[in-house]
Amino acid sequence: MTAQTDVDPASLRGSWNYPTTMLFGAGRIRNLARACKGLGMSRPLLVTDPGLAGLPMVQDAVAANEAEGLPTGLFSEVKPNPVGRNVDEGVAAFNAGGHDGVIAFGGGSALDAAKAIAFMSGQTKSIWDFEDVGDNWKAAVEAGIAPIVAVPTTAGTGSEVGRASVVVDEGSHSKKIIFHPKMLPGVVISDPELTVGLPPHMTAATGMDALAHCLEAYCAPGYHPMAEGIAVEGMRLVKDWLPAAVADGSNLAARAHMLAAASMGATAFQKGLGAIHSLSHPVGALYDTHHGLTNAVFMPYVLAYNRGAVEGRMARLASWLDLPNPSFGAVMDWVMGLREQLKIPHTLKEIGVGDDRLDEISEMAAVDPTAPTNPIPVGAPELKTILVAALEGRVG
């Protein structure tokens, strides 16, 4: 493979950020109290979802902190697609309990809600004033942002290494990205033992979310070779280990590799995402679908739409992933085969999405912050084309 000689040097520009301290490996949850104290916490609030709140992993974490002289509160009123009300109630619990830090514990929804609670704990403006538009984040009171330790229990969103949260605005029925650089957790504890109990269908859906992040980051326009390299290795880990994690949830090696892939996807997508996410966000907000599963359904339809802009990249990716006959078709065949192997629905209709809100979804997707970095420019008409294809099951 020869180097290109016609690249415009002016295009080789970017602003790059990378994640935080990560304690990775089986049993690392035992470092929770030390991580909290290292960030100056003396009375943290553990934020999780209702399903995890009563499980031993959460109760054990709270008890271990207590034993280390670190009294820890618990807040778990978080919906699968967290809404603004969840954040408001979490902030009220944070302030009422005199807490000084947040432990974000759980899957992507819990992590997003917890990060938003930590962010909003000392703000005076509405959370919607900090939507990721322009320089909105600069209006935040930085001293009012509580420190965060993140403990992921699923391998999908990578929210543990992200500087934003996705929260549903119930007033407009839309998902909004709330951003601030200091929302990035100060310490991440990635312990694969905490993901062992995740059922196969959720392992598959969250794993496909990690793949979507890596794939869209790799395809996004712009110059960011570090993000692209991370995205490629993340996809290799998904290819090699997601089927194993779904087949045997007790496989700690598979669970560990998928935790790494999830964090890699969220690290890589600072380069950008695309139409998979810009369509998935409004669908999730309007139909309350699982985000990773929705991404998985949209994936081949968006890939097919973008073919003209990414064909060369897909050939390189296929070679790096050791797929037969490296080409765009090889990547598409792999994606389709993986979806079938993991029992991912092929159409939006199979996850409860109807054809009654096509224009609304398309218009919402067109203004989603992830739309501008799709490899081919998309507006509402183009996004509606992809949406209809995903409803009808037409790939290509």
Image: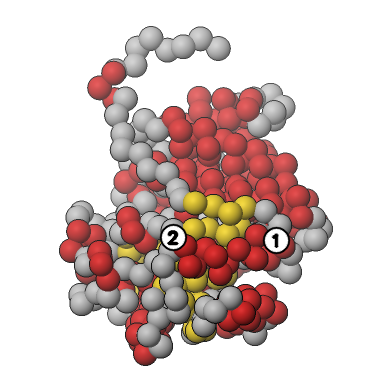
Q: In this view, which residue lies farthest toward the bottom?
A: 96
Secondary structure of the residue carrying tag 2 is loop
- Number of numbered discs present? 2
- Quadrant of residue 118 in the image? bottom left
Residue found at x 20% / y 75%: 125
Q: Amino acid at mark 1?
A: Gly
Q: Residues within 10 Å of mark 1 (few under 14, many from 20)?
A: some
User: Relative to the observer, which residue lies in front, 217 or 89?
Assistant: 89
Q: Residues within 10 Å of mark 2 (few under 14, many from 20)?
A: many
Front: mark 2 or 1: 1
Residue found at x 31% / y 34%: 14
User: Relative to the observer, which residue lies in front, 244 or 315?
Assistant: 244
Which mark identifies residue 27? 1
Q: Amino acid at mark 2?
A: Pro
Secondary structure of the residue carrying tag 1 is loop
Q: Quadrant of the N terminus?
A: top right
Asked if residue 384 is positioned above or below residue 228 in the image, the reply reads: below
Decide if residue 48 is on the left or right side of residue 143: right
Decide if residue 360 is on the left or right side of residue 149: left
